[in-house]
Amino acid sequence: MTMTLDLAFTIERAKAQEPIGSPCTGVCKIDPAHELCAGCFRSRAEIKAFRSMDDAAKLALLDELPGRQASVSGVKIA
């Protein structure tokens, strides 16, 4: 059974890990209107590059995700 998680929870969990972990929520579906994952709000390129990013870059990206979520929250993800 796959469990989806809240973005805020996965961001805090990721920040607490060493090295910095993934903010994946288990949704893993790209919204074609915004080109962002419907769960974690990362782009395909960011998802692909995440493992090779240094911790500072990961933290900067994690800090951007709630704003992205808020900017598309009124949009239905197909």
Image: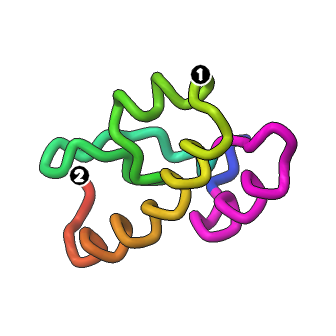
Disc 2 marks which amino acid?
A: Ala
Residue where numbered disc 1 is placed: 52
Q: Is residue 14 magenta?
A: yes
**As drawn, 59 above or below 58:** below
* Rendering coords of residue 65 (x, y %): 45, 61
Q: Nearer the viewer, residue 78 or 74?
A: 74
Which residue is at 40% across, 45% downward?
42
Residue where numbered disc 2 is placed: 78
Please identify the quarter of the rendering in which residue 5 is found. Answer: bottom right
**As drawn, 60 above or below 50:** below
Per the rendered image, the range of residues in magenta is 5-22
Q: Is residue 21 magenta?
A: yes
Which residue is at 34% across, 76% downward?
70
**As drawn, 47 above or below 11:** above
* Rendering coords of residue 22 (x, y %): 65, 42
Q: Nearer the viewer, mark 2 or mark 1?
A: 1
Residue situated furthest left in the rendering? 33
- Quarter of the image with the N terminus is top right
Q: Nearer the viewer, residue 65 or 25?
A: 65
* Rendering coords of residue 66 (x, y %): 46, 70
